[in-house]
Amino acid sequence: MTTTAISAVIPVKDEAGNAAPLAREIAAALKHAGPHEIIFVDDGSVDTTAAELLALKSEIPALRVLRHACNLGQSRGIRTGVMAAKGEIIVTLDGDGQNDPADIPKLLEALAADPGLAMVSGVRVKRQDTASRRLASRIGNRVRSRLLNDGAADTGCGLKAFRRDLFLALPYFDHMHRYLIALMRREGWRVDFVPVGHRPRLQGRSKYTNLSRMVVSLSDLMGVRWLQRRHRGPAGTEEL
């Protein structure tokens, strides 16, 4: 019986035209990565996203498609996929196709090279977003970095590789995917970074606006800061 080693988890919401090509690219990127699965979590799409993915199942045997009955958000989509995953290592990507699946092997190699790492996070270079979004991201990253001191330059990059059991040990809340680095380090686990590419969105439009992202981020920041202050650090437990 073959054991799944790697599970790619991709939450999608109304990504018709993007999801199927992305699935093919992920399959190509993982072709030589050993036993793996590709899990798309349809987060209550109202377009043909799910149908387009289901049509690929005969072409991509490793493909699994899960679906939320209603829209629950990106963090819930990631958690649903991770909980259903059979792999010990999880790779996440955004469903809009802006993360390049060709970068997946770099993250997996970095994680495999250091058993002490909990997560490897991508840092986008030459971002293909609008000027207003890049500016909002820079401001947000500076504020977050000052408050959380997590050492992260780009928490918004959806391309990450991490150990499944450690992710499931983290406190869950909606929007937690933006704070995985801070949450991992809160537990005393190490995180590393690798530069990754970034591509323009070819179909559809972003589910977030700068204003909506800022409003939600402020309360989330305060919540994560509270979690940091209410944690005494790793226990260092040993059996006597």
Image (tube, helix red, strand yellow):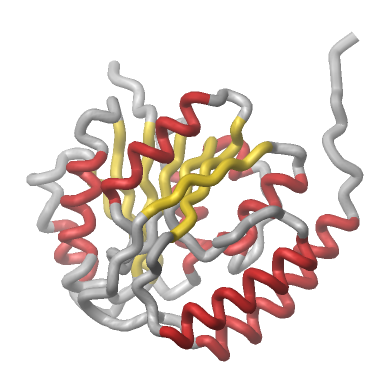
**Above/below status of 13 relative to 77:** below
**Percent position of residue 234, x then y:** 83, 35
Q: Is residue 35 above or below residue 70?
A: above
Compare residues 27 and 115 and report the one nearer the observer: 115
Residue 103 image position (x, y, % from top left): 33, 46
Q: x, y (%) of residue 133?
A: 47, 82
Quarter of the image for residue 46 reads: bottom left
Q: In this view, does 49 lie above or below 63?
A: below
Q: Which residue is drawn at 42% across and 60% down?
A: 125
Q: Residue furthest top?
A: 240
Image: 73 above or below 111: below
Residue that protrudes farthest toward the front in the picture = 126
Q: Classify the position of the N terminus by image quarter.
A: top left
238 vs 49, left or right, is right
Image point 82% across, 58% down: which residue?
227
In-front residue for pair 65/27: 27
State the count of labels.
0
Question: Would you identify the image quadrant in which residue 158 lies?
Answer: bottom left
Residue occupying the point 65% across, 77% down: 217
Quadrant location of the C terminus in the rendered image? top right
Q: Which of 96 and 83 is in front in this view?
A: 96
Q: Residue furthest bottom?
A: 211
Looking at the image, residue 107 sits to the left or right of residue 215; the answer is left
Q: Residue at x 49, y 71 (%)?
A: 72
